[in-house]
Image (cartoon, rainbow, N blue to C red):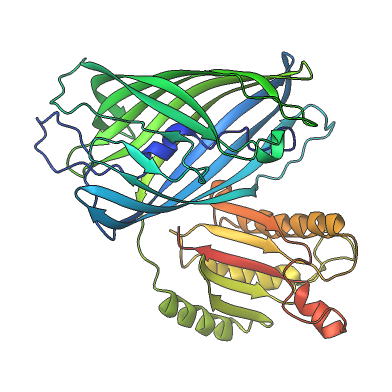
Amino acid sequence: MRYIENMNRISSIAVFLLFFALIPVTAQSDIFEFRHVKGARYRILSVVDQAVFINGYLSHRGETLNRISVEVVDVIDGKGLHKAVFQSSERVIYDSQVPVQNTSTVFRWAREYDSVFERDRLGHLTIDPQYFMPVVRNVPVFPDRPLNILDRWSAEGHEVHDFSTSFGIQEPYRIPFVAHYVYVGERRWKDKLYPAFSVNYRVASSPPAVHGWVYPTRIYGEFDQIVYWDHILGQAVAYEESFRITFNLSDRRVFEFRGMAHAEFVEAEEMDREKIVTEIIKEIERLEIKDVQVTATDEGISLSLDDIRFHPDSDRMLPGEEIKLERIAEILRRYPNRDIKISGHAALAGTREYLLDLSQRRARTIADFLISRNVRSPDRIVVQGYGADRPIADNSTEEGMRRNRRVEITILEN
């Protein structure tokens, strides 16, 4: 989104779903607490659907897709040390300033944050001030006692926001609040009943003035969630949230964000990179696909299409390129449980802004093609354009420029 960067919050409760691990208890037990297992790996997938109003008028509506992958790297005295990566991508559904709406269903890669923090058995978080994620902290915090249905409790928490690009506030900006909880008994999520509790809190803050920047003079909002818990698995399986947050700016504009969000906890199956690389190379040889390089990366398995051809200065593929992509699609269907990232790259021939836009549009063309062939649903593909920022060959030669003018399809581990 191009209005106020990063205001489309990385869904609040998604960050507290990280690391729910309840001590196994009987179905009758109402004792909630965290238990952390060293080496455990999992992820949270959340979708935020929100509308943005400026001075009371609808400006745009969009969706944010968040992927949060986590590993419990150590457990000391019952406290879990977590290493996490927070990734967000976005798509515009409606924009009042664009007469003809963009019909692409693809999510565009937006931001990525690393974080390291510790959580105790009742939910209290310890984290270095440098980290921007998770946004919502100390939610949930459980009381150190058994809970009966309709029991209520309250605990302090706070939100932390990245306003560095939007408002020039360089440090993570902290907004305290008091969260109120109610144990509501069993609620249904995806045709199954789970013990659930509600969470609601309100925020209000007046950030400091920042010289030379438009800055928020007041921030206020309200958030309401239902969290679904699994006593047998010992974790939260999902959440649903409604939210409304308003920014009064120093230039007298008022931005209001209204929306709904939901998330699911997914246990991460470790990717056997060596095995998958070998399998894909054999398939590429069998299908006689040329100019494709397969490598294992930190993100997963990357297929680099070194000679995917487009019309000059266009995101339209040349005739015949669909045949290559049909064969690539056949390979990708072998790994249906893995999400996909498509990265566009360009040779050094134009301004940086132009090349970033062109590579983004070309990546989106590939994504739309794969979606149309039912390789993945739109919420399981994200695109990113790198322009000429990541060359793999010498741009002074025609062969080097051909290799740099590539598209990479990454089968993601998380």
Q: Residue at x 89, y 62 (%)?
A: 313
Q: Is residue 34 left or right of residue 129?
A: left
Total numbered labels: 0
Closer-to-camera residue (203/267): 203
Q: Residue at x 47, y 40 (%)?
A: 46
Q: Is residue 139 left or right of residue 401?
A: left
Q: Is residue 205 left or right of residue 83?
A: right
Name the quarter where the C terminus is drawn: bottom left
The reply to whether residue 263 is visible in this rendering is no
Closer-to-camera residue (138/408): 138
Q: Residue at x 38, y 37 (%)?
A: 16
Q: Residue 178 sits in which quadrant?
A: top left
- Give the vertical position of 219 relative to 289 (above or below): above
**Residue 354 in the image, given as x and y percentages of width and height:** 86, 56
The reply to whether residue 291 is visible in this rendering is yes
**Residue 254 in the image, given as x and y percentages of width and height:** 71, 17
Closer-to-camera residue (259/369): 259
**Residue 84 in the image, given as x and y percentages of width and height:** 43, 52
Q: Residue at x 63, y 37 (%)?
A: 6
- Give the vertical position of 396 relative to 381 (above or below): below
**Residue 145 in the image, given as x and y percentages of width and height:** 14, 26
- Give the vertical position of 24 relative to 364 (above or below): above
Name the quarter where the N terminus is drawn: top right
Q: Residue 83 sits in which quadrant?
A: bottom left
